[in-house]
Amino acid sequence: MELNLSRVDYLHGGSSFPNCIKILPTFSEDKAQHRLVVANREGNVQVVGWGKSEVITICRFNLGTLISALSLGGAVGTAKDKIFLASGNMIRGFTKKGKLFLEFDTNLAESIQNMFVTGSHLLVCGKNVYNQYEDCQDTGFYVSDDEITAVLALQVDKVGKLVPVISCRDRTLKVMDKAKVRYLFHLDGIPTALGLFNGDGGDIGSDVLVGSSDGCLCLVSIGDESAILRWTHDTETSAGVTCVDFYDVTANGGKELLVGFDDGTVQVYGIDGDDYQLVPPRLLFSQTCNESVTGITGGIFGADNFEEVLVVTYSGWVYGLTTETIDKKIRVDDGTFSISVDTRQKLEKLRHSDIIIIYRTEIDDLQERVIQERDKYQTATQTASSGFSVVPFFKVNDKMVLNREDASYLLTIEVESPIDTILIQSDVPIDLLDVERNSAVVSYSECEPDSGNFLLVTFRCQANTTRIEVRLRTIEGQHGTVRAYVTPRILPKCCQVRTFSVKSLSLHVRSHGFDVNRPYNTLKINGTFSAVEMHSWLSNCIPEMPARAPSSGEAAITFLSTFFDTILHCTFSKGTAEFKSDNVSTISILKDWITKEATNKKINLDIDCEFNDESVLHTLQLIRPKLDGYLSLTKQVALIEALKEIQAHDPDFEKILSSEYKYILNNADKLKAMHKRQPNYLDRLFGMITDLYIDKHKYNGINVKSRVPQLMEVLDKQNFDALVDFFQAPIYETRGSYI
Amino acid sequence: MSMGSTVLSIKIGHKILPGRVCIGLYDGKSPCLTCATYGERVCIEGQILQFSFSNILLLKLKKTHELIPGKSVDAVAEDITFLNINQPITCIAAGPMYRTSDRYYLFVGTQTNVFGYDVENNKDLFFKEVVDGVNCILTGCLSGVELGSGDSLAIAGGNCSLQGFDAEGTDVFWTVTGDNVGAIALLDYDGDGENEMVVGSDDFDIRVFKSDQIIGEASETDTISHIAPLKGSTFAYALTNGTIGVYERLQRLWRIKSKNHALAIVGFDFDGDGFPELVTGWSNGKMDIRNVKNGEVLFKDNFNHPLAGIFTVDINQDGKMHLICCDVEGEVRIYQPSSHDGRMLYISPNVEQEAIRELSIKKHHLLLELKNYDASGAMKSSTGSTTTDPSSRSRQREAGAIPTKTTLQTAFSINMGSDEKGAHIEITLSLNNDAQIRSALIFAEGIFQGECHVVHPKLEALQSKISVPLMPPKNVVVDLHIKAYVGFSDSEHFHVFEMTRQIPRFSMFAVCKDPNPQEITSFVRVPIQERPARLVMWINQNFLLAEEIDFKTGFSVSFISLRNHQELSFEVETSGTTIIRTNDMDLAGDITEAEYPDEITHLVRAVEEYQESNDRLGADISDQSGVIKTLLIRAEDARLIGDIKGMRKWYMQLHDANRNLINQHQIRCNMAENISESIKAVNQIIQKAARLRVGKPKANVITACRDALRVKNIEAISRIIKSGAT
């Protein structure tokens, strides 16, 4: 790494919410220590500085309610040192000394999730509602169909007017004008974090950095009528971006991009000052801690003259990644000591050991109190004659997201306290793939055939594990529920269940490109259903459906299969719906699902299926690169060991090697990792090809289940042309139709 | 945490076979890293047949000041020597054999041989055939063994057997243990100044041998892969399921289980306090150093590949030990002691930082717990009066409220099974009110597929009582750690009830209603000095009985095994003499007379037959390889003179001969497997027979059986098993 940063722990601020730390601006001399404002979810806010070894609290106050957003602001032309806090639907403003100067009820129907303050403008968002205020006067609101993930506005003094930008889960940026959507900008991933580029929007103030849930960063220039995507950078972390900021960590005059991820990774990127719109950022530093990052900012905090990145994690730890090289203070090079180094080392140790002693006494006191309370609790639960005993509440941060790259779900569970055990239960067939980073002991339990369980797995965690990742592979056409029972190491012992639904078309994601040139199969449905009903049926079948039924009463939504790259296009309104897909299996699953839902509701449907024969060949062509790619990967991996062995015995061996073998040798680790990531990939692919084959003939009214073994034979031959021939061979023998 | 400048790193450039690494001072002074590496392989028709060659690589280790700290260097070719061993190496060890010399000798074990080698003089010490194969080997002194020559033994652990060779290869020591030997260590277990031998085997048992007597036994939960002496009677062990731990005599101090498994363990005084720490190398490339008393991690380092071996060695010959770790890809790291006080330079800048972080995390958790008690108190007072409002009731349920005084009870019972499921025992968990068990997790070692069994009933069928079938495969005491999630079907939060229950040792035996003890032909008669009352107590404690047996002066009781429906009966006479009838020799313990004749005859004959045909095949194969050589030369000749037709002919023949050879090889492989299976079975029978006796007679049985085996006197073996050695 080009940048060398060392971690320093500062304080524990209590359970965090997104972007809950900010550095307060100062006007004092350059390179002096800054102050930090930290808020926690429970309502505590503190402004702190750092002394030699401990936190100096400047002011501290408690709002008495939950806080959900923090923003800094100030009148145009002054320093942005006013602290704005959102709790419920209230906005409060405090000075940096902790004096309340504003209290304002937004009357928002939902509680505020996101807030942005610029000059006299205040933008707030609930889950779906957006509202803007100027000098606390309501200047308009907007209701989005899909969940809002972040909000910001371009700098008014740079662009001359208020241009709010909101990002939504439906993979769009909505550029607003007077609380109306001026235009939509489509993104590839789900946007999860927004930041004004360089802190001010770049050269003309219109550049916005967008971080997405699949770990991509992109730069978007917001124009009057449309936006331009400047670049997209894949961080290859496969974790979601939670926060971004800009700060000159390297002290070279240009700001760096700081990014925090939900897997605990912190990255620092260098930006090309002149051509930043053309040149993607360059990675300077990357480090991972074991808790997700919720907020990131830059400043000088721990010591004068040393720039650092300040990070807050999910459970509220605030730590710095400082340019001050702590290592050097006590580095001992091959046994030779310089006296100054030695003394500094001793001083350093002294400083630390004092803190350790203070902590130890504190902990002893606490432990005693805990034991008392524990006894009290025990007697209470056993003596009270009537009444109920409840378990302590603990917050679980969880998500299950589809990874586009390998069409698998990543299930993440994070708790503020260390986790004891996690039980994962599924009533639908899924594959569980362990994640290398986990240190937990995994144990698969036998599932009795009639117990309704397809998977029972326990994760017994090592001490201090607060976060666990699990990869799951689903099968399209199968739906059900995955439950995670989370037991933290807190007393009294308790457990919380989290449920995640696996939908029938589980491998589909929202997309915005509807390619009209593909051969589509069409499913037309007419009946006495409302748009809301159809929306709810589809919501239970396809992931990433908008959270609310279309307000206009009509919807046109496109999805992409992450596994096959086939498209599903849905249009529906009251009484009529049309689905187009180039994959006949998708149409088949959808038809079965809607028929079932309608039957449950006793609604009669008029179904019309139009099968496009070309589509099957088209789908096969889409599969071909995956099939060939995987087969050649398997072959390459099999050769690695043999090649390495020959290499070990003959150093000149490389010179006579063909380029393919050279490639294998040079990329051995990468190839192995790729192969390991996809166990039983071929089986999965074959399963889907089989479904395709069955569904193709189902539309012709022929049941071909008996021919599946023959198909398997053809597949095993690994000859694509033979596969196409097999698919196209006419079948004369009919064994009852079941369409 | 990286050690930065404190590490010296050498890249050998060759793969190392895990576990087959040692350090030898072959000239008596300079250490030499010795490891087994891959040899040639022959690739036939796309499938790789390991044609059984390994090499031994010797690397001279330079003194540390000749190396650049913190940098990785490649080993120089002139420092490396190869020894070709034309067999797959299963284990290697090096050690001094004579008190008068510091020179080390190298010992190599293969699937059929063990040999000693004098590296310095490049000559063999001995070469011995060991039919059992050798799984692990080590050198050292063992109390109570008379040596023919030299002062040390090379001890080879094989298929249920342990064999000690002196410097000339005379096997001066032989004994048997319960299963394949996985690990051996020598340490002074009883503090008498002489070494005892601690042996871990595949039947999950760790046994301590003093000479050929077992003086201690501990049961573990999986195959034992490593044992390392620490200090005095303290030793560390590792299991193949990822557990490592420390025993002080037979008292386990601690154990931890990891997702990965240990590939090397060694004791090393890391912090300079005079007591060793435990260094572990893991399969994921992690290396950690732990406190022996509590398992706390003191230091960690990461390798890019699984570890192959860890040792301590005085590399500079100045009396200071260095720690050497190597991974399977041939990276060797040397951790050097600090120059001033002998302690290592492990003070990573972040050690204190991390201590502070850990303490503040601890503080945070304690505060959280306190807060939890406050919150639960508040909730209770607000709902203290039983509300009848259904909506608030459901809200309570969602939050996991259950009636106070809810308790979880457990009970064991025997279920004779049905058509689908065989007979088993079951544990029933039940609550004392209408609260329901959402799910139950039972953690136990060795009785489930994984370490945990989960019961998760369908949501619509939740009850306040569930039964879990158990089928312990061995007669050992098993601890069940139970976690039950208690709530209601609409709850999102649950109370976790945790408890530990023990399954009695002979739980898989049910009382037999109409016993027929006369049908059991084998029995053991024991004169027990204890009062029969004690025996009744023992039975009550170790069997699952619906009602306890009452004490009578003489009684008999019969059990039936839930595993194989064989009967077991106790006949206790007033005098205290007890007859235990069972056909399962393993089941019978502490006893004097037995009748187990048939099995062994059969097995020994089988071994002989296999060996004969094996020898015959071996001869065939060497003939064939001669043919192949000729064919190859002819074919190549034909190619050179452009006789394509001839070449084709010769290559076709070669192809046939080749296929023949592979087939024969396959047969030989199978045969070898059969032989080793049979030998194992023979050794196990001897061991079981020895277990029927205590003390000196026990050791005598083993020696007598061995002698009888050597002269193939099968009748004698039967006689010895029946009435002991005289």
Image: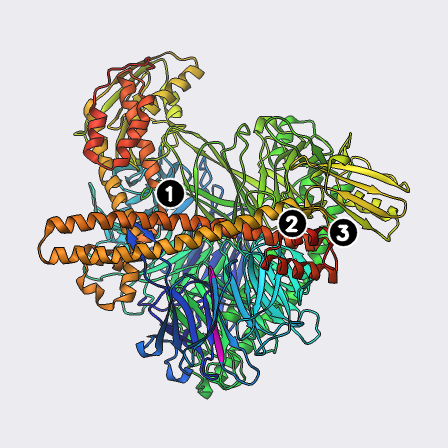
- The residue type indicated by label 3 comes to Ile
Residue identified by numbered label 2: A491
- The residue type indicated by label 2 comes to Leu
In the displayed structure image, the side of residue B157 where residue A289 appears, left or right? left
> Which quadrant of the view contains residue B38?
bottom left
Indicate the quadrant containing the N terminus of chain A: top left, top right, bottom left or bottom right. bottom left
Residue B106 within the magenta-colored segment of the rendering: yes
Q: Position of residue B286 (x, y in %)?
A: 46, 62
Residue identified by numbered label 1: A149
Eye-nearest disc, 1 or 3: 3
The circle drawn on residue A526 is none
Q: Report helix, strand or loop for mark 3.
A: loop
Eye-nearest disc, 2 or 3: 3
Placement of A468 over or under B270, stated as above or below: above
Prevailing SS of the magenta stretch: strand
Front residue of B99/A595: it is B99
Residue identified by numbered label 3: B591
Residue A451 within the magenta-colored segment of the rendering: no
Placement of B511 over or under B474, stated as above or below: above
- The residue type indicated by label 1 comes to Thr
Residue at screen point 42% across, 29% down: A479
Q: Magenta stretch: give its range.
A: B104-112
